[in-house]
Image (cartoon, rainbow, N blue to C red):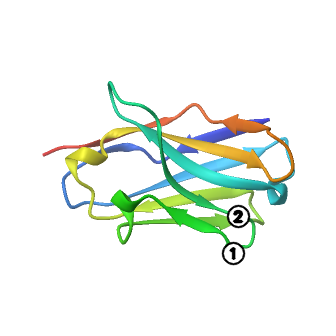
Amino acid sequence: VQLVESGGGLVQPGGSLRLSCAASGFTFSSYIMSWYRQASGKERELVAARSWTGAMTHYADFVKGRFTVSRDNSKNTVYLQMNSLQPEDTAVYYCSARALTNPTVYWGQGTQVTVSS
C-alpha cells in the first residue's frame, strides 16, 4: 500500500497550491480519502474528506470556501486545491485512506506547506 503526496511548497499569503495523493495497493473505491494537517506543536486535524462518488464530502470549518477536495478515480488520485492560503495554513499535509467496512487506515508520508511572505 502506498499513498504518495506531492505539490507542497512555499507560497505567499493569498496564494494557491494543489496537493496530489497517488494511491496504490488497495481498492480505491472502497476507501474514503481524506486530507489532514499537522502544524508544528499541534495535533493532527482533519481538513477535508471525500467518498468515491463524492456523495460524502466534508470540510473543516476553517477551510470552507477556500479548499476543495476532489478525486480522479481513474487515476486513483485525490487532490486538495487550496486557495486564499494564510500563514495559519502552514503545516504538514497528510493524505489518508479509511476503509468503508473495517477499521483500516493508511497514511502518506506528508508534504510540507508553508505560507509566508
Task: Give residue 67's position: percent from left, percent from top.
Answer: 41, 64
Q: Which residue is mark 2?
A: 51
Residue 19 rendering spot, x and y as whole percentages: 49, 52
Q: Secondary structure at mark 2?
A: loop
Looking at the image, which is closer to me, 52 or 100? 100
Q: Is residue 33 left or right of residue 35?
A: right
Element type at mark 1: loop
Q: Which residue appears at 36% of the width and 38% of the height?
A: 91
The residue at the point 22 percent across, 53 percent down is 86
Q: Residue at x 59, y 58 (%)?
A: 49
Type of residue at label 2? Ser
Q: Does 6 sit above or below residue 67? A: above
Residue position marked by numbered label 1 in the rendering = 55
| Image location (x, y in percent) of residue 51 | 70, 64
Q: Is residue 76 left or right of residue 42?
A: right
Q: Position of residue 55 (x, y in %)?
A: 69, 75
Query: How packed is label 2: few (under 14 Cα within 10 Å), some, or many (20 or more)?
Result: many
Query: Quick one: which residue is furthest to the left in this view?
Result: 117
The circle drawn on residue 104 is none
Distance between the alpha carbons at the discs numbered 2 and 1: 6 Å
